[in-house]
């Protein structure tokens, strides 16, 4: 059985959907339901059992339970880049992950965990995942969340006792169904769709760098349905341990994202950006630490045998908007 933590979250619940789509339901879900509507992310899923996050290690200490597990996908962590409590982040994103690593090492099973593109900081050292541990140590995250993820990456690369296969995933800008509970941390596609439906227009940040036009700041936007295919690939593979990017390898502008979201929502691809996008000044406290460009280097993933095509931004947004956001039931 596959143990998935953070099970009601964005990526984990979408992975359960992907596994169900592939005919798999031998899944243990672990997480917290809380007071949000996160439970809707798993309402239609088929799985074997549920374990609360706080009870997981007690549950795993029972041999009958532990021997069922053939692999662990650890998506359970604090993913808020605005979180300021560093002790909380280190406990959730570092300490908890170490415990699961040690469990997988002892049981000789595969372990996949969520790292983050936030570990790259402002991108001054690039976005290459095929580098030495010494080069990874030089990365300088811009926030405490990114540092908590980098701290575990650095620790993992030092270990002599490891799971059968271990994979850390640096997610870039993921968007798609199941993110509805994320509030401010939801994708710009989600926020653009809702802002346009409410106001008939969308606001984007002006650029404060001469080499970028307003709305021309670039990100590597990757669709959730592609992300979970990669995760399933690693679940089924062997001998590919390491840290990997998941993006598309193509950087696109926020202007591209906004106009494609608006066009998809109206099913009218003749709408001009100048008619529906307004550019507003970026808050001064963001200007010195704002990323103008991110783009995942994807050669390492391709080199280990992943051949699936990724959605283009246009394809992903069209599917998300027309087959999910515009539907009464927007979930997978």
Image (cartoon, grey):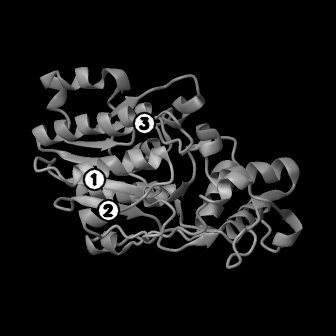
Say left or right for 184 vs 102: right
First in residue order: circle 3 vs circle 1: 3
Q: Secondary structure at mark 2?
A: helix
Mark 1 and mark 2 residues within 8 Å of each other at the beta carbon:
yes
Element type at marker 3?
helix
Percent from the top left, x then y, of residue 240?
21, 62
Q: State the separation of the CA atoms marked 3 and 1.
A: 16 Å
Q: State the separation of the CA atoms marked 3 and 2.
A: 20 Å
Identify which residue is drawn at 40% across, 43% down: 16
* Residue 157, percent from left and from top: 21, 55
Badge 1 or badge 2: first in the primary sequence: 2
Judged left or right of residue 206, residue 53 is left
- The residue that label 2 is drawn on is 136
Q: Quadrant of residue 321?
A: bottom right
Circle 3 residue = 89
Q: Which residue is mark 1?
A: 154
- Vertical comparison of 207 with 18: above or below: below
């Amino acid at each position: 059985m596959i143990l998935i933590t953070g099970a009601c979250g964005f990526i984990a619940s979408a992975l359960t959907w992907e596994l169900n789509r592939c005919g798999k339901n031998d899944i243990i879900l672990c997480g917290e339901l809380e007071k949000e509507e996160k439970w809707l992310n798993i309402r239609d899923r088929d799985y074997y059992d549920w374990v609360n996050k706080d009870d997981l290690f007690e549950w795993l200490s029972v041999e009958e339970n532990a021997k069922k597990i053939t692999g662990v996908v650890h998506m359970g962590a604090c993913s808020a880049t605005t979180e300021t409590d560093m002790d909380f982040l280190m406990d959730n994103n570092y300490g908890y992950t170490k415990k699961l690593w040690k469990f997988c090492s002892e049981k000789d099973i595969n372990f996949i965990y969520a790292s983050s593109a936030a570990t790259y900081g402002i991108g001054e050292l690039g976005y290459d995942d095929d580098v030495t541990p010494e080069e990874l140590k030089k990365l300088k995250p811009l926030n405490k969340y990114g540092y908590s993820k980098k701290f575990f990456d650095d620790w993992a690369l030092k270990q002599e006792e490891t799971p059968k296969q271990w994979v850390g995933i640096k997610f870039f800008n993921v968007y798609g169904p199941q993110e509805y509970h994320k509030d401010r941390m939801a994708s710009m596609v989600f926020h653009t769709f809702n802002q346009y439906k409410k106001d008939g227009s969308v606001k984007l940040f002006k650029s404060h760098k001469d080499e970028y036009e307003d709305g021309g700041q670039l990100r590597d936007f990757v669709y959730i349905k592609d992300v979970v295919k990669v995760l399933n690939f690693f679940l089924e593979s062997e001998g590919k341990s390491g840290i990997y990017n998941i993006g598309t390898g193509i950087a696109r502008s926020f202007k591209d994202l906004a106009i494609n979201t608006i066009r998809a929502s109206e099913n009218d691809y003749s709408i001009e950006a100048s008619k529906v996008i307004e550019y507003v000044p970026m808050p001064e406290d963001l200007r010195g630490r704002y990323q103008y460009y991110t783009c995942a280097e994807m050669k390492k993933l391709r080199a280990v045998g992943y051949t699936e095509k990724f959605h283009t931004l246009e394809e992903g947004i069209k599917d998300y908007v027309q087959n999910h956001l515009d539907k009464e039931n927007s979930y997978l």
